[in-house]
Image (cartoon, grey):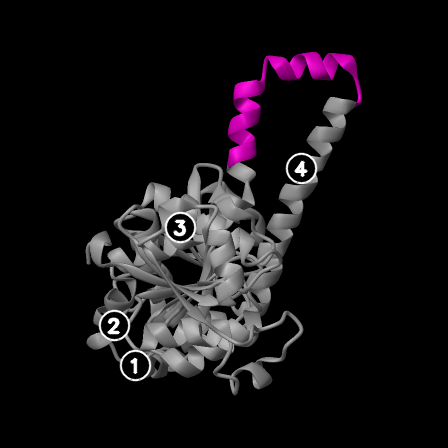
Amino acid sequence: MSNKNLVISIDAMGGDNSPRVVIEGLALAHKRNPDIRFLIYGDEAKVKAEMAKFPSLEGICEVFHTQEAVKNEDKPSHVIRNRATSMYQAIEAVKQGKAQAVVSAGNTGALMAISKMVLKTIQKIHRPAIITIMPHEAGRYVMLDLGANTECDGINLAEFAIMGNIYAKCALNIDRPRVALMNIGAEEMKGKEEIHVAAHIIKSTHLNLNFIGYIEPHEIPRNKADVIVADGFSGNIALKSVEGTCHLITRLVKNSIKSSIMAKIGLLFMLGAAKKLKKTFDPRLYNGAMLVGLNGLSVKSHGGADALGFSVAVENAAKLVARDLVGSIRRELENVDLDEISQEAYYDVY
């Protein structure tokens, strides 16, 4: 699909500073991707007031008024019954074929619940997963699951490996991504039984994945793998630990520079390196986690993202649509019976 035919639906009322940040983010995304069009769902008066600040958006956006918006405190069990929200309507647009992807900075649990109910899971996928891109010392890697499934069996982890492999090809342009299971050690018998079963399934010649074995959390930033696979509980903890460490390093560096005149003078000679480091750790440039495994692209922007961060989430969605991520996953699973492979794996392990 060319960008000229690409339409993305937007939940304009999700996030901490909507719709201002959302509309400003669309203007930034449009500047770099002038052919993308947007269907915007939200409070029409507020949305159009923000759009008036960006004449470049005229003619590429269609605004649909919605009476309600999903709040951060809303429970998923409540919002899935309310079709009047901007989030629900934006997701529904993907199901109806009006848009090829949806982007929202709203309530994560609500976005997951509505996306799963409306878009449905791809046939042969048991559970969708949350996936995102993160930096390592030599580039980027993808990691899943990041919270959609706190408990997983071996076949779930194997499905995540397949989807992560395709995602890395599409998002990172890696021909044969290195796939690893996150574990508490590199030894073959370390960890829980579902990890052992997943390893046996992934090793199957039917899948033809570039599986490199287990990876410990402290090895993730070292460019040892391109796809990190974990259950949602472990993956979410690992992600937040990495984010917390990045913030700690940033604060320590700033405090060190402020501590003496010599440090400030030294910074002048390191401006190039400092700018490069800041860009590497800038969370806005990695914004846009998505629910992978559904019959449509549903992308979650961080609720506190600024305009640049939201624009990155939109551009990530556009790239994955253009590279047919959903179709690629479907085709990969067409001739694979993971349930049968998993039975063989259980016999091998036990």
Dot 2 and dot 4 residues touching (CB under 8 Å): no
Dot 1 and dot 3 residues touching (CB under 8 Å): no
- Which tag, 1 or 2, sits closer to the chain's start? 1
- Residue 69 painted magenta: no
Dot 4 and dot 1 residues touching (CB under 8 Å): no
Residue position for label 1? 123
Residue position for label 4? 249
Residue position for label 2? 330
- Magenta part of the chain: 259-279
Percent from the top left, x then y, of residue 255?
76, 29
Q: Nearer the viewer, mark 1 or mark 3?
A: 1
Residue at the image position 29 percent from the left and 71 percent from the top = 98
Q: Kindly give the residue lying farthest to the right in the view shown.
A: 259
Quarter of the image for residue 314 reads bottom left
Residue 293 vs residue 21, the one in the foreground: 21
User: Hey, what amino acid is under mark 3?
Assistant: Asp
Q: CA distance from mark 1 to mark 3?
A: 26 Å
Quarter of the image for residue 157 reads bottom left
Residue at the image position 31 percent from the left and 57 percent from the top = 37
- Which tag, 4 or 1, sits closer to the chain's start? 1
Percent from the top left, x then y, of residue 195?
48, 70
- Which tag, 2 or 3, sits closer to the chain's start? 3
User: Hey, what amino acid is under mark 4?
Assistant: Ile
SS state under label 3: loop
